[in-house]
Image (spheres, rainbow, N blue to C red):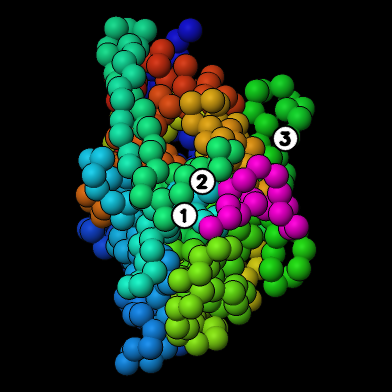
């Protein structure tokens, strides 16, 4: 099997100079490329953005504290601020050595089955994610140790490659070894720019790409996740998170504030204290709620209007050839280049935009190699939401690493492609059968995004 070189000239119709987020596109290529608002943001919204930026970057304190409105950390937590995980609004990474802590990564945990709303079942004493830090007087829940093996392989042309295979061990567990049937899922923090545009894509646009029964027999059967919306009190389309397990940004932010920092909100009014954590239950509160609605709303607006860095070098013949190969290899079946937003009353600037996020917001079976053994609402252990690719080529500049996939195991974009399996096996195999020059062109295209 082979795919011929496409040449420099023909490029897909979606490869246009405005490749990005249209009204939310910026032309910044520095380490601040993920942290900028749209240049078209109204003055009033810019003030709210600035306040939201403060909420995103503030280190929360243990209650009671003199910093009014910014206390209530813990009692168990992972990090003290949003930006501690989403560094410069970008992508997290796994620890580089077994003894290092998970600073921009966390581990979701659950028991088999579903809770009353169809979601994962919390683990007694530990909840739904392992909190590796705690305030004084409260034990941290445990610690994750990550080690890597190497899986060696060769392209059909003889070029060698190696994949890093992660192994996880959970030590210093505060309440003893957890049940044998615990499911766990390590996940790095994803970038947070462009999310307002993805939130504004109409549900109909997402669902029109779904093909759960593979009716067209192309081997690709994207499915929507259906998740619980707390404010509506019903099941709706999931959009955010590695398994599309959150319906919208406000709930995503409130859930992260509780699980990662330990902050209650009107959406999650109960403290981050799992069943049986007696010392944590006695810890002081920072108020009810600790994350005021005003702060949550400003934080949500901040993420809604974070701009998307424009694609670069689109006139380069290798980039244009790589874009054509990206389409020819059917990568676009999941990483849809173009979506359209709908109406958005709160931020008019997001409405009716033609954007290029390279995602379909659907779940896809990625095979056994990437399976985490943990279901999340309707997402199986083998299914993951297609991650957006916009901005991916600036990861090294912004975050000073090139770790990709849900757990950061891939040390480069190339390794991430080689891990693809399941519905993506055909595209991966086609990539492997390309000439070395064509592989380089496809990777150069992805680096241009």
Residue carrying label 2: 178
User: Residue at horizontal 28%, vertical 51%?
Assistant: 101
Q: Residues within 10 Å of mark 1 (few under 14, many from 20)?
A: some
Q: Which residues are magenta?
A: 110-125
Residue at 32% over, 92% down:
66
First in sequence: mark 1 vs mark 3: 1
Image position of 326 (left or right of 379): left
Residue 70 place in picture, x, y as percent: 39, 84
Q: Position of residue 162 (x, y in %)?
A: 29, 21
Q: Which mark is residue 175?
A: 1
Distance CA(mark 2)–CA(mark 3): 38 Å
User: In this orientation, does residue 414 appear?
Assistant: no
For the C terminus, give its image quadrant.
top left
User: Whole-percent x and y of residue 97?
Assistant: 23, 40
Mark number, residue 211: 3
Q: Are marks 2 and 1 in contact (CB under 8 Å)?
A: yes
- Callout 2: helix, strand or loop? loop
């Amino acid at each position: 099997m082979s795919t011929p070189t496409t040449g420099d000239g023909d490029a897909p119709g979606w490869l246009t100079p405005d490749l990005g987020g249209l009204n939310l596109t910026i032309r910044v290529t520095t380490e601040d490329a993920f942290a900028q608002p749209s240049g078209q943001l109204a003055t009033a919204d810019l003030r709210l953005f600035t306040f939201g930026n403060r909420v995103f970057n503030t280190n929360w304190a243990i209650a009671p504290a003199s910093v009014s409105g910014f206390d209530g950390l813990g009692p168990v937590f992972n990090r003290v601020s949003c930006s501690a995980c989403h560094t410069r609004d970008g992508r997290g990474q796994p620890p580089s050595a077994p003894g290092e802590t998970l600073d921009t990564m966390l581990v979701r945990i659950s028991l088999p089955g579903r809770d009353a709303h169809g979601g994962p079942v919390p683990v007694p004493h530990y909840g739904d994610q392992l909190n590796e830090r705690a305030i004084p007087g409260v034990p941290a829940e445990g610690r994750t140790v990550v080690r890597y093996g190497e899986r060696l392989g060769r392209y059909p042309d003889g070029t060698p490659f190696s994949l890093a295979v992660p192994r996880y061990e959970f030590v210093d567990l505060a309440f003893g070894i957890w049940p044998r049937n615990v499911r766990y899922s390590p996940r790095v923090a994803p970038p947070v720019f462009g999310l307002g545009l993805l939130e504004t894509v109409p549900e109909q646009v997402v669902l029109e790409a779904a093909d759960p029964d593979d009716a067209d027999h192309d081997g690709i059967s994207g499915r929507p996740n259906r998740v619980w919306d707390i404010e509506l009190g019903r099941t709706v389309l999931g959009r955010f998170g590695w398994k599309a397990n959150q319906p919208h940004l406000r709930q995503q932010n409130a859930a992260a504030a509780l699980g990662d920092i330990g902050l209650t909100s009107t959406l999650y009014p109960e403290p981050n204290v799992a069943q049986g954590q007696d010392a944590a239950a006695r810890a002081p509160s920072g108020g009810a709620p600790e994350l005021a609605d005003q702060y949550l709303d400003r934080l949500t607006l901040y993420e809604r209007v974070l701009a998307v860095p424009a694609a670069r070098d689109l006139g380069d013949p290798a980039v244009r050839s790589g874009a054509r190969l990206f389409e020819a290899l059917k990568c676009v079946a999941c990483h849809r280049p173009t979506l359209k937003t709908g109406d958005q009353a709160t931020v008019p600037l997001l409405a009716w935009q033609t954007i290029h996020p390279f995602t379909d917001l659907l779940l896809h079976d990625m095979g056994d190699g990437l399976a985490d053994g943990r279901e999340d609402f309707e997402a199986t252990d083998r299914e993951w939401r297609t991650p957006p690719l916009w901005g991916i080529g600036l990861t090294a500049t912004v975050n000073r690493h090139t770790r990709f996939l849900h757990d950061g195991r891939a040390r480069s974009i190339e390794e991430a492609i080689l891990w693809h399996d399941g519905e993506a096996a055909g595209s991966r195999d086609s990539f492997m059968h390309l000439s070395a020059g064509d592989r380089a062109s496809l990777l150069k295209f992805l680096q241009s995004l």
